[in-house]
Amino acid sequence: MTESCPASPRLPVVFMGTPDFAVASLEAVSTRHEVVCVYSQPPRPAGRGHKEQPSQVHRSADALNIPVRTPTSLKPPDTQQAFAARNADIAVVAASGLILPAPLLEAPRLGCINVHASLLPRWRGAAPIHRAVMAGDPLTGITIMRMDAGLDTGPILMQEAVPISPLTTSGALHDVLAALGARLVLTAIDGLAAGLTTVPQPADGVTYATKLAKDEGRLDWNQPAATLANLVRGLSPWPGAWFEHDGTRVKVLEAVLLPGGTFPNAGLPGTILDERLTVACCDGALRLLVVQRPGKGPVAAEAFLRGYALSRDTKLRVTGQTTQKSENINEC
């Protein structure tokens, strides 16, 4: 649901964002409007030297000569007063990582709008791109909504859908949605200036895209191969799905699903089935195509196997598996 609206006059805008996803929106808004200030999360230690590094949005704003503020919280009265003093007509928020209190939501003349990487109300929250791919969703998209006090609960200005193919990774989808968000946010600003009305989010279909847990990428071979294929795609290239063997954690960046019946005598989940790094799951098998060892770059499975012994019939660790075959180990 995208409406065409006449181009609005050049407006003063506050932009709020932190990661790479938000950079395209910032750059797009700055070409059409006056971005009077950027709010981003404070610099954090990164890299080998653990030196504090500004966020991607911060660096982009510096390159555009836009002033940047990096408060740790937006609750202090002086921070809210400084925000209001910008006299922005609208605030554009894209993955800022900061909670906006009511005084900030109410300060801009046209309100605050959010560039959200899902078709709300599905996947409200912190990791909508990863969660959509991990869940095997066939469709996602961008929602531009007017923000309210809830977590991604505000009314919708516009949406546009994007298909998710069986080969789509979170990394590839991220780039598509970032570009789409940059295009739609300009249309949304024009719409708000022209009096475009919003539509409440449906009450049905609400899901939450919680933050990724540290061990969520572990490949549990007791799961169906289709589930693990989605997990690999959903966590590629970051933070990466993984398995362990002899104390080494191996990240899996690409894999392909092999349906049940490909290996009729596959044996226990976690068994290496051939010389191509195919692993038995509780239903079907997963062929690992690109993997990465700690401190190494990503390599094709064939190259990995030349330097790391994982021969046929090797048993990879299975979550919860004992040395004895469980009666239910092949149940999905």
Image: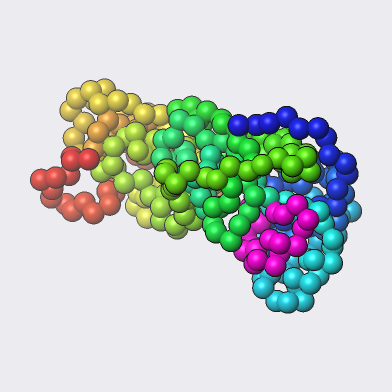
Expressed as whole percent of the image width and height from the top left, the position of residue 138 reads: 45, 30
Q: Is 147 or 313 nearer to us in this picture? A: 147
x 81%, y 32%: residue: 6
x 60%, y 36%: residue: 159
The residue furthest bottom is 77
Q: Is 297 or 255 nearer to us in this picture? A: 255
Q: Tell me if residue 44 comes above or below residue 136 in the rendering.
A: below
Magenta stretch mostly in which secondary structure?
loop
Q: Magenta span has 305? A: no
Task: Describe the colour scheme in one phrase.
Answer: rainbow
The residue furthest left is 327
| Left or right: 327 as drawn, with respect to 3 | left
Give the tally of numbered discs: 0
Query: Can residue 93 be seen at all in this image of the molecule?
Result: yes
Q: Is 300 or 327 nearer to us in this picture? A: 327
Q: Tell me if residue 223 comes above or below residue 112 in the rendering.
A: above
Quadrant in the picture for residue 31: top right
x 88%, y 44%: residue: 10
x 36%, y 29%: residue: 257
Q: Which residues are magenta?
A: 94-112
Q: Tell me if residue 30 comes above or below residue 263 in the rendering.
A: below
Expressed as whole percent of the image width and height from the top left, the position of residue 331 reads: 18, 40
Q: Magenta span has 107? A: yes
Expressed as whole percent of the image width and height from the top left, the position of residue 150 reads: 55, 59
Expressed as whole percent of the image width and height from the top left, the position of residue 304 reads: 46, 37
Q: Tell me if residue 138 comes above or below residue 190 in the rendering.
A: above
| Left or right: 56 as drawn, with respect to 13 | left
Q: Which quadrant holds the N terminus? A: top right
Q: Which quadrant holds the C terminus? A: top left
Query: Can residue 270 be seen at all in this image of the molecule?
Result: no
Quadrant in the picture for residue 137: top left
| Left or right: 14 as drawn, with respect to 322 | right
